[in-house]
Amino acid sequence: MKKHRIAPEVKEQIINRIKNDGITVAQAAKDHGVSEGSIYDWLGKKTTEVPSILEVNKLRRENEELLRLVGEITLKLSETQKKR
């Protein structure tokens, strides 16, 4: 299998699509003709940076919202099953 060198700008574009646009690694790999493993390697190398306090707070808020939604869905499902 022949290895192709991917330009740093293209790597950055792929990583940004995953981070900002929410596409999956699988979709990005398919779109750009790159292996998923390569993209995971690139993402791993990018994680050596310390996240900013703004990023941490954003993730914390998103996590709290997701937990709230899971709780609501669990309650609704439980109520539905009790009615049967």
Image (cartoon, helix red, strand yellow):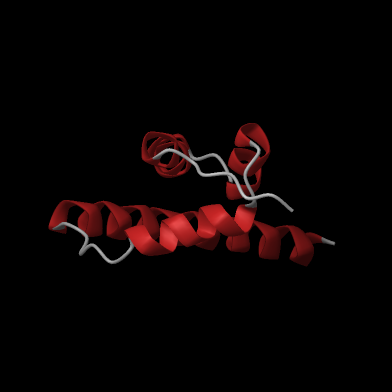
- Nearest to the observer: residue 22 or residue 76: 22
> Is 34 displayed left or right of 69 in the figure?
right
Residue at 47%, 42% in the rendered image: 18
Please give the count of numbered marks on the rendered protein: 0
Compared with 34, 72 (above or below) is below
Q: Quadrant of the C terminus?
A: bottom right
Q: 69 or 42: which is nearer to us?
A: 42
> What x and y, as percent, mark residue 65?
39, 53
Occupied quadrant, residue 52:
bottom left
Residue 2 can be seen in this image = yes
Q: Is residue 31 above or below residue 58?
A: above
Image x and y of residue 53, in percent: 14, 58
Task: Kindly give the residue lying farthest to the front in the view shown.
Answer: 2
Q: Is residue 21 left or right of residue 29?
A: left
Q: Between 8 and 55, which is closer to the camera in this rendering? A: 8
User: Which residue is at 55% across, 39% downward?
Assistant: 23
Q: Position of residue 15 (x, y in %)?
A: 43, 44
